[in-house]
Amino acid sequence: MKTIKYIEIKKILEKNSIFAKSNISDNENFSSIKTLSNSNKNDLSFFSNIKYINDLKKSKAKACLIEDRYLEYLPKNSEPIIVKDPYLALALISNLFNDEYINSNGIISKNSYVHSECKIKKNVQINPFSIIDKNTELDENVYIGSNSCIGPNVKINKNVVILDNVSIANAIIMENCIVKSGARIGGTGFGFEMKTKQKIIHSGNVIIGKNSSIGSNTTIDRAVFDSTIIGNFSNIDNLVQIAHNVNIGNYAVIAAQVGIAGSTRIGDYVKIGGQAGISGHLIIGDNVTIAAKSGVTKNISNNEIVAGFPAKNIKLWKKEIIKNSLKK
């Protein structure tokens, strides 16, 4: 079983400019990270939500990531690790306990197919039954899972992980991205002239910024002429549809079953809840939050929080919900 010393926890927090205060010995071992209710004497836990205050009081964890204002609720058997933001600390420390980290072994399976026009750099892994089509470039330390089809016209940069059953064409994937199983990137979008239903040929591509994550069975369509763009450090959940020519900024968080219609532009630090739908040719500002199941039909200014259908300022939406419930 993998164990982590407290000195390793301190180092990863310090590396990310997070100050932690604790009396725990540097050589103290932790076997895993668990929730307050499921933790035992060898585990590290965390407290970041007041809803779980009763679990905190009964926790059996060896230590707990916690803010100093909640120390009085922590049992004596659990040592505090005092940090300003326990959930951020948890996110960083979780990497230490990650047993599923994927690192290329540099082996290209004999049961894969690599087109003669491809460029493959050092330490690339290609698993069985995957196809690397023409005009494709795989940079160093790229990992390609089984049954995936990469290309044509694809450039995948360093340290990218492509899991099983993925198809990518007409795309640039920047470094340190992960594309999860079943994703479809760079296919032709849903475009045609409405009267005659004449299909519109798509000749653009998809660009996915560095350190981004694309969920399982998510579809990102290539642009008609230019690029469909996903910004840096963006996290897109499973079963999301992103249409042609959509432009999403940096640090986006998009939950499952969201649909974004063509040519909509979305700013930085946007959060979109599950099953929300966004019409085409809209402009969504920076720091916008769109609640789950919202239907966005108009532009949204910076820093707004919207909900409902049609989506509107969440305070107005809540007032309407209360008013309608009183009528019943």
Image (cartoon, rainbow, N blue to C red):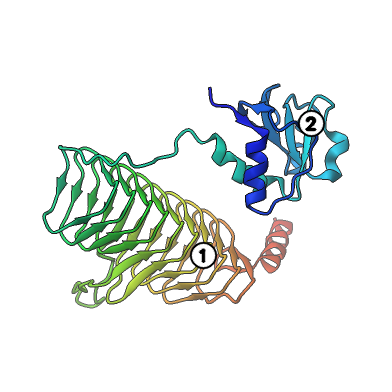
Residue at (17, 57) in percent of width and height? 118
Residue 121 placed where, x, y %?
26, 53
Residue 302 placed where, x, y %?
61, 75
Cβ–Cβ below 8 Å for labels 2 and 1? no
Three-letter code for the amino acid on which mark 2 is drawn: Glu
Label 2 – label 1 distance at C-alpha: 46 Å
Say whether residue 8 is left or right of residue 322. Answer: left
Residue 24 placed where, x, y %?
76, 32
Say whether residue 53 is left or right of residue 108. Answer: right
Mark 1 Cα shell of 10 Å, populated few (<14), some (14-19), many (≥20):
many
What numbered label is drawn on residue 79? 2
Q: Is residue 328 above or below residue 227?
A: above
> Quarter of the image holding residue 195?
bottom left
Residue placed furthest toward the left: 116
What numbered label is drawn on residue 53? none
Mark 2 Cα shell of 10 Å, populated few (<14), some (14-19), many (≥20):
some
